[in-house]
Image: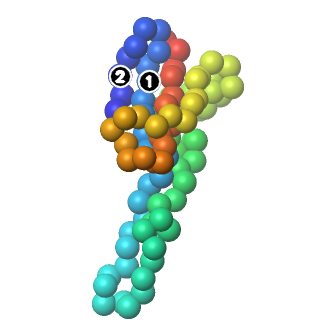
Amino acid sequence: MIGQQGNFIWAIIPRYKRKVRPAPSSGKFIPRRQLLEPVAEKDIVAELIGADEKHELISAQWTGVVLTIAPPSQMQAGQKMYTIGIPV
């Protein structure tokens, strides 16, 4: 979800990305919570902008990008997402 509000372009991206579950015939069982793995901050940034702007935005994180972890109402209880605001 990407939008603009006031002087910020913001985006909400899931904090976890889903791992691939093995085929049922393999006989392995993996708990659902282990199918989710943390997404690194730099991966979130890469999803928000093109590769050409990647370096610029990552360095800007320390000077003006707002990074919070917020549970939006449309998410399941306990599932958190990153909200990144980029000053424009």
Residue at 37% x, 79% y is 22
Expressed as whole percent of the image width and height from the top left, the position of residue 80 reads 49, 43
The crowding category of the residue bearing disc 1, from other C-alpha atoms within 10 Å (few below 14, some 14 to 19, many at least 20), is: many
Its colouring scheme is rainbow
Q: Secondary structure at mark 2?
A: strand
Left or right for 74, reference 12? left
Q: Nearer the viewer, residue 64 or 68?
A: 68
Query: Residue at image x 35%, y 22%?
Result: 3
Residue 85 to residue 76: above or below: above
Q: Quadrant of residue 28?
A: bottom left
- Tell whether label 1 touches label 2 (CB within 8 Å): yes
Name the amino acid, label 2. Answer: Gly
Residue at 53 percent across and 15 percent down: it is: 87
Badge number at residue 10: 1
Residue 56 image point, x, y percent? 58, 26
Residue at the top extreme of this rendering: 6
